[in-house]
Image (cartoon, rainbow, N blue to C red):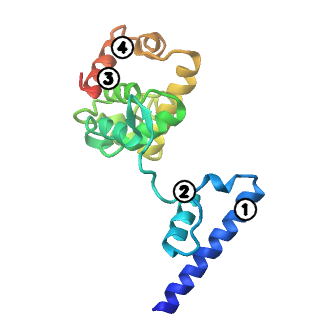
Amino acid sequence: MKAKIRTIEGILLSLVVILNAYLVYLNINVSDYNKINKSSSTANYIQVESLLGLLPSEEDPIVYDGKTLDEVADTIERQLNSTVKGKGYLIASYALEKGVDPYMATAILLHETGCKWGCSYLVRECNNVGGQKGKGCGAYSYFNSLDEGIKAFIDNLYKNYISYGLTTPEEINPKYAEDPNWAKGVNKYIEIIKGL
């Protein structure tokens, strides 16, 4: 057993040395990281894991509305039902990655699909969460998976609205929907999501 521990310690120490050499090669100041304690295999293990980014940080970063990504995802998830239940993290993370307000994206999704209670035919049969026009499902786009449909919906919000400076439901309304009261419906969902 001691031999196995020494082998593991040796491997970890070798990884630390290799990683240090690589960081020096990249002109990264290794001294900015915790000093490697060669007398403690645990310290060496933690050093390697930390440098590789495998250990979680003590505090997750705030990403939106004073919340971490997990908290934003949980806030969204509480409003999802039916077919989209369990997609809160995907919506939150992908919307933030694309620069789209995740609460507004969720509110539009809920307004368009009815997924606050039971999702529409387009969602259930076509994986289309945004009422996107196209082919494959009558006059609407068909997506191979719900994840693909959610990402396409968020991509559409970014590409055709957000990137043009249309960032609120009121600004999006004239281009997105014929109903002049569409923004009011979306804003009601945003209030529900935020718990207002």
Observer-nearest of 130 and 159: 159
The correct choice, above or below, for 28 with respect to 46 in the image is above
Mark 4 to mark 1 CA distance (whole Å) = 53 Å
| Labelled pair 1, 3 in contact (Cβ < 8 Å) | no
Which residue, given by chain and number where applicable, does mark 4 sit on?
Answer: 183
Q: Nearer the viewer, mark 3 or mark 4?
A: 3
Q: Which mark is residue 53?
A: 2
Q: Nearer the viewer, mark 2 or mark 3?
A: 2
Which residue, given by chain and number where applicable, does mark 1 sit on?
Answer: 22
Sequence-first disc among 4 and 1: 1
Sequence-first disc among 2 and 1: 1
Give the side of residue 38 with respect to residue 65, left or right: right
| Residue 91 % position (x, y) | 41, 38
The correct choice, above or below, for 182 with respect to 96 in the image is above
Q: Residue at x 45, y 9 (%)?
A: 174
Q: Amino acid at mark 3?
A: Ile
Which residue, given by chain and number where applicable, does mark 3 sit on?
Answer: 190
Q: Nearer the viewer, mark 4 or mark 1?
A: 1
Q: Residue at x 60, y 55 (%)?
A: 33
Q: Secondary structure at mark 3?
A: helix
Q: Secondary structure at mark 4?
A: helix
Mark 1 to mark 3 CA distance (whole Å) = 48 Å
